[in-house]
Amino acid sequence: MKYSIITFGCRVNQADSLAIEDALRSRGANHAPVEDADLVVVNTCSVTASADQGARQTIRRVVRNNPGVRVVVTGCYATRRPDELQDLPNVVRVISNADKDDLVRLIEGDGAEGDGPCGRMLAPGVAGRTALTLRVQTGCEESCGYCIIPKTRGAGRSTPLPEVIDRISRAVVAGYKEIVITGVHLGSYGRDLSGRASLADLVQRLAVWDADVLFRLSSLEPMDCSPEIVDAVAASPRLAPHFHLPLQHGSDRVLARMRRPYTAMFFHQLVDRIHSAMPHAAIGTDLIAGFPGETEEEFEETTGLLRDLPLSHLHVFPYSDRPGTEASQLTCKVDGPTIRARGGELRAIGHEMSVRFRRTQHGSVRRALTVDDGLSAVTDNYVKVALEQKRSRNEWISVRID
């Protein structure tokens, strides 16, 4: 069987897709372009209405180019509105997030033989990947007013620490030199496990790993980025000096309406602490433009805060109503043109920040992992650089940034 996987959304979805691919290949399936595949798995996101629309459009385009293909849909959109996907052409099955780990077995039928998603670990370079994204946690029990994910991912569930260590060990043996640790609410890792376990415990284990591997933490909520984690990253060459800390807004009034459990000052102090300990660290964030009731003054609080922070990149999302969320019931919605204008202004600030951060790296020598078939490399602090000479993929090199 020939397969292809299309992934939308977050790093957790990326990790889930890699696990599905491992399971398919362990059963003898071969990767193929979408237009030649017998089976296409579409792993959806539902964080915004445009994400839903993108998934539907992609499925229709896949079928136009490959009329005989079987399409299996999973992910957050598949969990939230399976009815909207089941009726699309060539969709043979819609599988919720709760059953995603068993996707391959389910589409084969009960009793199928072969390894599960955690079976054989594929080597770097398969299907174009170099770093491995490893999911250690899923689900979320926070109550952010705009977010539908707790309803599509369910309660927080952590992979036991011995199992995480085993997966990492097998990944290192398979040849991976960089592993991205991810979760839907990564900072809650371990809270559901019996005995003492936390993200800080996991980070401490990674900090002293005896193989030459780099661990990169995925998105981490500001309130979960503890001093212990910051200190561990600053002290260990095994941990990438790279943080992604979703701010969402720079006004305390809007943060309260969003039900985000921190203030703008807390975020400012956290970023200052990281930058003081690691001036070379990449620090990125997420922002929502046009949250219901956002005034011009509140928006300017965000832009003012951003200009005071040593951030390296921004991800900007225009606010989108998600039915079933608290924010969708709020009045005083911001009009579309204003949302787009504010989003554009935030992206412009983000571009300035990215350029400023890259300029601070000029002349520095950083460790980097070669990607893109050896034509470029990504540094430990998340700067992608073009190489003057082609190298082998998945090779550690030292680069001078010019």
Image (spheres, helix red, strand yellow):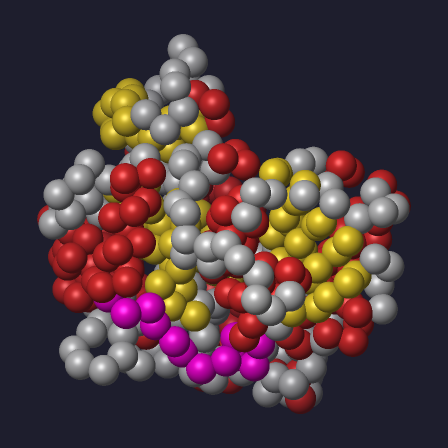
For the record, the magenta segment spans 150-161
Question: With respect to residue 49, does 399 lie above or below?
Answer: above
Q: Does the stretch in magenta take in 155?
A: yes
Instruction: Verify whether residue 66 appears in magenta.
Output: no
Q: Is residue 192 visible?
A: yes
Q: Can residue 224 be spotted in the picture?
A: no
Q: Quadrant of residue 329?
A: bottom right
The answer to which of 275 and 89 lies nearer the viewer is 89
Q: Quadrant of residue 334?
A: bottom right
Give 230 or 175, whichever is nearer the viewer: 175
The residue sitting at 26% across, 55% down in the picture is 166
Q: Residue at x 66, y 54 (%)?
A: 41
Looking at the rendering, in which quadrant would you find the N terminus? Answer: top right
**Picture coordinates of residue 374, whole percent (x, y):** 43, 21
Taking the spot 69% from the left edge, 36% from the top edge, the residue there is: 33
Q: Identify the residue at horizontal 80%, vertical 48% (top origin).
A: 69
Of 309 and 151, nearer the camera is 151
On the picture, is 270 further left or further right than 75? left
Vertical comparison of 276 with 142: above or below: above
Query: Residue 92 in the image: x percent, y percent?
Result: 77, 63
Q: Is residue 271 left or right of residue 208?
A: right
In this view of the protein, which residue sits in the foreground, 289 or 129?
Answer: 129
Residue 282 image point, x, y percent = 33, 45
Q: Pick the quarter of the image with the C terminus.
A: top left
Q: Position of residue 164 (x, y in %)?
A: 28, 60
With 34 as the anchor, is 262 left or right in this view? left
